[in-house]
Amino acid sequence: MANKIFLASILTSTALVGMTLVASAQSNNPIKVGLSGPFTGGSSSMGVSMRDGVKLAVDEINKAGGVLGRPIQLIERDDEAKNEVGVQIAQELINKEKVVATLGFINTGVAQAAQRFYQESEIPVLNNVATGSILTNQWPDQKVNYVFRTSANDIIQSAMISNEAVTRLGLKKPAILADSTNYGQLGREDLTLALSKLNVKPVAAEKFNIGDTDMTAQVLKAKEAGADVILTYAIGPELAQIANAMAKLGWKVPMVGSWTLSMASYIDTAGPNGDGAIMPQTFIEAPTTPKRKAFIEAYHKAYGGDRMPSPVSAAQGYDSAYILAAAITQAKSTEGPKIRQALENLEAKIEGVVTTYDKPYSAKDHEAISPNIPIMGLVKGGRVVPAHPEDLAGDKAVRVKPKG
């Protein structure tokens, strides 16, 4: 009898040791987070900047002890700005890599195609750059939503673009030039609606394809229609061709468009022809606060250069990593539903580069950026500067989302 009791004691002790070792091993396992975007191709300046901003934040978080005592491990994938590749990556990150969340999506079309897999799997995804207005409301009939955003959506941007052109500049005959992607065409629709609220109708609306290198025909039609301003929804390389076509025709009117006019691929490809372009920006690479100064210095120390390829993408990516880390910490879990609930009820106030996030989300609102946060930027001498410096003066330097 004594031998049986002794043996049972040994087995129980062994089982407890085994359970302790398993728990210890699990507690040391990294927390896998997906990082998805176009790291090659025409959208790469956005994707690489976003990726580098996220990596910078994750390095800081891990050096400070990680999350729940565990390091964050980024699982990077290049979606090449292709919808079908984005879908494959989403499935791989969810089913093979077992990520607890994903940061990324640069292109609206890729996000539209791939996000449903995160929704179905109950895994949060934070859109860092994609701005299509529909993205945080793709499934209005479902009780919960796993898609969040840290960028300024196109409803916000289209209103700012229209206000800049019509109200601030006093121009009444806009022509809209947009690419043929979901991003361009959804943006064109938002822009047309925003203009209608100001009792203005476009005199022309032209589209083009990704990869087109000559926009002379589209620009000429806008000119012949009597346009006094060009409004754009596209990405950098093609936007540069619009500016170059205007120069080729000797036609100079203001160019106002979505935030992508700040991309390095626009500024560098257009050269002097690109100066004067105006666009909404959540972040301009200027040390207007101590947090922004530290971020800019850390970014260039890590990645070199004297100008971020896409400052907006880098800043929004950086902030998203801290938002996700705060949610996992609050949830005390890596389970998707618990992270989602924490994101919708964040208790921690997060000092970000773009803004200070104080309850940025709710169950009904998954947009961290409100209309009062972005300002208008201006391309000048190969860099983006505030179009209206007074917008960043004094206590306007940090604009915070209103509560309620």
Image: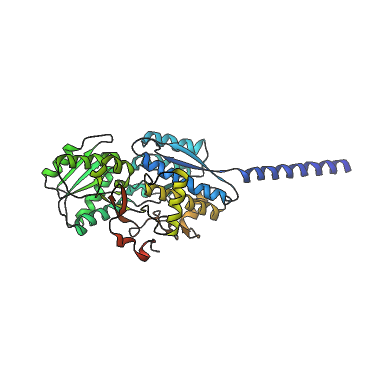
Query: On screen, 266 above or below 283?
Result: above
x, y percent for residue 50: 41, 45
Asked whether 174 or 332 is in front, the reply is 174
Please state the horizontal and vertical placement of residue 233, each as a whole percent of the image: 26, 45
On screen, residue 79 versus residue 391, left or right, reads: right
Most foreground residue, 140 or 152: 152
Q: Residue at x 20, y 37 (%)?
A: 215
Q: How is the image coloured?
A: rainbow
Q: Is 222 left or right of 213, judged from the image as shown?
A: left
Residue 109 percent coordinates (x, y): 34, 40
Q: Is residue 375 visible?
A: yes
Q: Quadrant of residue 372?
A: bottom left
Q: What is the residue that sits farthest to the bottom in this orientation? A: 395
Q: Is residue 124 visible?
A: no
* On-image quarter of the C terminus: bottom left
| Viewer-nearest residue: 397 or 366 | 397
Tell me: 136 left or right of 162.
right
Check the image and report above or below for 289 versus 101: below
Q: Say which quadrant the N terminus sits in.
A: top right
Query: How many circles with numbers are drawn on the protein?
Result: 0
The image shows residue 53 at horizontal and vertical percentages of 44, 47
